[in-house]
Amino acid sequence: MSEHDSTRDKVSQFYTRAVKSGCGCGCTCTPPQKGEAAKLAGYTADQLAGLPEDAVANSFGCGNPLAFAGVTEGQTVLDLGSGAGIDLLVASRKVGPGGRVIGVDMTDEMIVRARTNAAAAGLTNIDVRQGLIENLPVETASVDWVISNCVVNLSPEKAKVFAEISRVLRPGGQVSISDIVVKDLPTWAKESAALYGACVAGAISEDEYVAGLKDAGLAEVTVLDRIYYDADQLLALVKSEMPESELGCCGPTNGGELAGVMAKALSGRIWSARFHARKA
Ligand SMILES: C[S@@+](CC[C@H](N)C(=O)[O-])C[C@H]1O[C@@H](n2cnc3c(N)ncnc32)[C@H](O)[C@@H]1O
């Protein structure tokens, strides 16, 4: 297995554990605070109304890529790393029965959840495909929108992801991506396997993101908005994104304390940015 495949494999295992929410080590630890990410992500009450509870509770995003996005009826939306499906459901309502929503994710458990949640919501225009965002199982020049929520940071091959986004967009197609970006991360954080899964260690800076999208041939690349986290929010986010087993619930360190130390040290160095771009 290549180093990149091994990284993806670890990420996939991380999200399988996260969505199953068990601590995975037979100890009596508090379950992760599921749903915290969705609360911080800025979904409107209207967007969340009537969605299956499982999709909201298992939202691991860090923004709301469809907030104010001009997605209209009949369009095709592709969600990279669709997880349990929260943005698939929100997009499905926007494009209506005449539109199409495609989700791509590599993790079996997430694919099952997203399909189950789409069925529970009675939405039939959602197609969840297994695959890698670095090699999308999607036709060239076939989608109107590429959205993604807290996923590209997890890729060990971001240039490939940006190139794939550009390939699958129709001329005039648009990008709306929410993702974690970082500035001056300490070395211990960059090297932390747990923080990689938690969308921190693999994250790049805003400038690198913008350059990556431009290098892939996309135009009008801008940062539309940012979500800054205060220390308490960062703590909630670290805890919600990291399975208890990653926080050492069975070891000598109390998971909550470790998350607190991490959150304090990372304060001001991590935020969520929403990027927009267009295929010329
Ligand atoms: C932080 S979660 C976000 C899920 C979803 N977008 C949301 O907002 O809830 C990351 C998701 O991306 C998927 N993922 C990560 N890297 C991937 C890759 N290289 N190819 C495909 N899926 C990937 C994971 O399996 C997981 O479901």
Image (cartoon, helix red, strand yellow):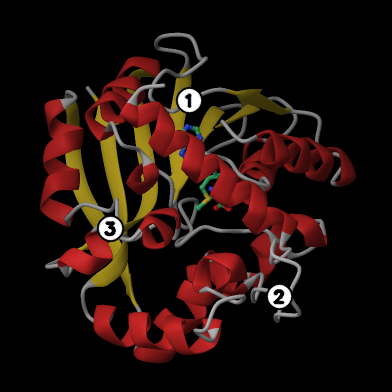
Residue type of the residue flagged with mark 1: Leu
Please tell me whether mark 2 or mark 3 is closer to you in this view: 2
Is residue 115 in sight in this rendering? yes
Residue 30 point in image, percent of width and height: 70, 81
N-term mark: 3 or 1: 1
User: CA–CA distance between discs 2 and 1?
Assistant: 29 Å
N-term mark: 2 or 3: 2
N-term mark: 2 or 1: 2
Looking at this view, is 205 or 64 the one in front?
205
Disc sitting over residue 31 in the figure: 2
Residue 241 point in image, percent of width and height: 52, 65
The C terminus sits in image quarter = top left
In the image, farthest residue toward the front: 252
Please tell me whether mark 3 or mark 1 is closer to you in this view: 1
Labels 2 and 1 touching (C-beta < 8 A): no
Q: Quadrant of residue 244?
A: bottom right
- Within 8 Å of ligand 1, the CB of disc 1? yes
Count of number-bearing discs = 3
Q: In which quarter of the image is residue 73?
A: top right
Q: How crowded is mark 3: few (under 14 residues within 10 Å), some or many (20 or more)?
A: few
Q: Mark 1 points at which residue?
A: 132
The N terminus sits in image quarter = top left
Q: Name the residue under label 3.
A: 224
